[in-house]
Amino acid sequence: MKKKRRMDRQVQKIIGIVCLSFLLGTMGGAVAANLMPVTEQGELTLFLQGAVERTQPPSFGALFWKYLKYDLIIWLGGWMQMGLFFSGAAFLFRSIAVGFTSAMMMTAYGTKGVFIAATSFLPQNLLLIPAYILMMSAALYYMLHWQEEGRKRTLKRERRRKQTEYCILFGMSVLLLAGAAGVEKMLLMV
């Protein structure tokens, strides 16, 4: 019973740290967008306006791959002893990109940018952010547990069970990513 309570607290701490780092990354991206020189903001504004007015929306596969590559990097980092750097870098990059893009949309379009960001970025991010948080938390948790198991020399069966759990969590995150790609594809078609 004590071991389960300790594990629950550890999972809560990991999720808290992951959520806080995502929030800090998002805020960092927004700050970076607002600290850009005016000339670069103007160039990026023109690019964003062209991207929003694009006539040919990307395919579902292209959208899905765009999201899956970050999830794969995070997941693969969970298998390595020093994978925290790979997983953390992909996770942090994704959070900074969310903050930067949202802030630039608001900078480019003013008050209309809030509406554009809410309608074009928020729906898919309601699925993407939980998927990335789930994978980063799982990668960190299992990375710590696999190192612990190496010292305890637990049974192969227990190790395989944990590996299977980790793969199932990856599958759940892939389903969330597919949903996010589908939502974005529908938004782009409208």
Image (spheres, rainbow, N blue to C red):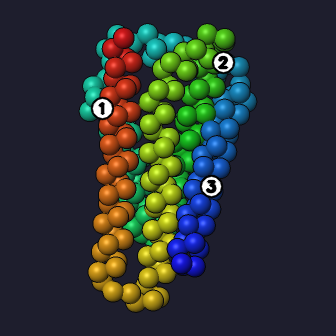
Q: Identify residue for label 1.
A: 62
Element type where label 3 sits in the image? helix
Mark 1 or mark 3, which has the lower sequence index?
3
Give the residue drawn at x 49%, y 55%.
136
Give the residue drawn at x 57%, y 72%.
5
Quarter-of-image position of residue 51: top left
For label 1, count other residues whose C-alpha is less than 10 Å away and answer few (under 14), some (14-19) or many (20+).
few
Quarter-of-image position of residue 167: bottom left
Amino acid marked by disc 1: Ala
Residue closer to the observer: 67 or 135: 135
Q: Identify residue for label 3.
A: 16
Amino acid marked by disc 3: Gly
**Residue 66 x/y as whole percent:** 37, 37
Q: Identify residue for label 2.
A: 107
For label 2, count other residues whose C-alpha is less than 10 Å away and answer few (under 14), some (14-19) or many (20+).
some
Give the residue drawn at x 59%, y 74%.
6
Q: Nearer the viewer, mark 1 or mark 3?
A: 3
**Rendered image: mark on residue 190:** none
